[in-house]
Image (cartoon, rainbow, N blue to C red):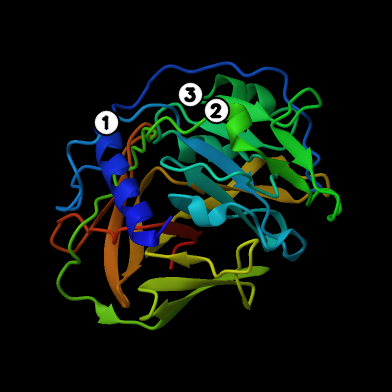
């Protein structure tokens, strides 16, 4: 499908999706696998308001992001990609699918405590993950989402023969959700439309973790920010380049959680509820912003200095969680 057709369909579906209210009820997952863990409010003017009502859940997939896991599969089809710090200064990704489902996503890895807070802003999402610490599983079960960990009796997960564990677990989304139902309830608080006045020209932007980094380089020819991770171009499974229409560097408090990995390293907890500073990159420019999320069930809003919503560009959004600047 051509990019213009695909993006136009996604725009219409997202317009319908923001009309769906947040769900408040929780759901209980079945027994989870243990962690193998070796471890919008203002749509763009051209969006159609005549699209069919959105239905079905958002799919959130925890995706591995160490070098051995690359290139990942299915990231280019995500509506949002969150980048978050994990143990030992490394990073992990959370891919959010609301309008299109790829054939495969992965490698899939384990969930963390702060994922539950992050996902509270979506309408009862499905969370696909490889497992979690035994003490965390009951907390996941009580969260307002549908937990779908990998298990021996699930045909939604497969192991790739050309990679070593734990970097070889892949999700087949259609086995969890069936065929796409015309758009899920993407309720993030994001707004899309014309770029604000001001900003500053910026050709590249880098975010560094202790043992990982993300760089975004503006491409005029693609009208996108080309993604690099740990100093290397980030590519799709078929060799293309990952690229974002909008990049958000969201400065948050990162504290220690009550959990550790099997090596004894503490799992960072990203506080995605609250407020703080952010940089929003779109159209080759950078804009200073303020983010706010009043409660876990609220969407995250981004505003300019005068308090007006800071519109995102049409297309995939990357949100990189960074510590306070």
Q: Give me the residue at 52% from left, 57% from top.
A: 76
Instruction: Answer yes or no: is residue 151 visible.
Output: yes
Residue 91 placement, left or right of 11:
right
In the picture, the quarter occupied by the N terminus is bottom left
Residue under label 3, please give it.
144
Residues tagged 2 and 1 counted as in contact (Cβ below 8 A): no
Q: Nearer the viewer, residue 44 or 146?
A: 44
Residue under label 1, please give it.
52
Q: CA distance from mark 1 to mark 3?
A: 25 Å
Q: CA distance from mark 2 to mark 3?
A: 21 Å
Earlier-in-chain disc, 2 versus 1? 1
Residue 110 placement, left or right of 78:
right
Instruction: Answer yes or no: is residue 210 visible.
Output: no
Callout 2 crowding tier (Cα within 10 Å): few <14, some 14–19, many ≥20: few
Q: Is residue 117 above or below residue 53?
A: below
Place residue 123 in its image quadrant: top left
Place residue 258 in its image quadrant: top right
Q: Nearer the viewer, residue 16 or 63?
A: 16
Callout 1 crowding tier (Cα within 10 Å): few <14, some 14–19, many ≥20: some
Q: Is residue 5 above or below residue 230?
A: above
Earlier-in-chain disc, 2 versus 3? 3
């Amino acid at each position: 499908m051509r990019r213009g057709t695909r993006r136009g369909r996604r725009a219409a579906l997202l317009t319908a999706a923001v009309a769906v209210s947040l769900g408040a009820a929780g759901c209980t997952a079945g027994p989870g696998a243990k962690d193998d863990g070796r471890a919008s409010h203002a749509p763009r003017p051209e969006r159609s308001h005549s699209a069919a009502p959105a239905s079905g859940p958002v799919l959130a997939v925890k995706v591995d992001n160490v070098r051995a896991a690359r290139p990942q599969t299915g990231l280019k089809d995500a509506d949002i990609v969150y980048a978050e710090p994990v143990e030992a200064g490394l990073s992990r990704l959370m891919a959010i699918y609301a309008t299109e489902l790829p054939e495969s996503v992965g490698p899939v890895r384990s969930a963390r405590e702060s994922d539950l807070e992050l996902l509270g802003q979506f309408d009862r999402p499905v969370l696909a993950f490889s497992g979690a610490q035994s003490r965390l599983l009951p907390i996941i079960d009580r969260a307002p989402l549908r937990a779908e960990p990998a298990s021996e009796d699930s045909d939604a997960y497969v192991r790739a023969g050309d990679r070593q564990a734990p970097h070889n677990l892949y999700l087949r989304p259609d086995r969890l959700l069936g065929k796409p139902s015309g758009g899920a309830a993407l309720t993030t608080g994001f707004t899309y439309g014309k770029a604000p006045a001001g900003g500053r020209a910026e050709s590249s932007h880098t975010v560094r973790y202790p043992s990982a980094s993300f760089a975004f380089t503006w491409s005029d020819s693609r009208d996108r920010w080309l993604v690099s991770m740990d100093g290397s171009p980030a590519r799709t499974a078929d060799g293309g380049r990952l690229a974002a229409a909008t990049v958000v560097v969201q400065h948050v408090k990162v504290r220690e959680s009550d959990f550790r990995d099997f090596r004894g390293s503490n799992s960072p907890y990203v506080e995605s509820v609250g407020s703080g500073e952010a940089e929003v990159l779109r159209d080759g420019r950078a804009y200073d912003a303020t983010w706010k999320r009043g409660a876990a069930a609220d969407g995250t809003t981004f505003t300019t200095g005068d308090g007006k919503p800071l519109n995102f560009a049409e297309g995939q959004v990357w949100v990189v969680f960074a510590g306070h600047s």
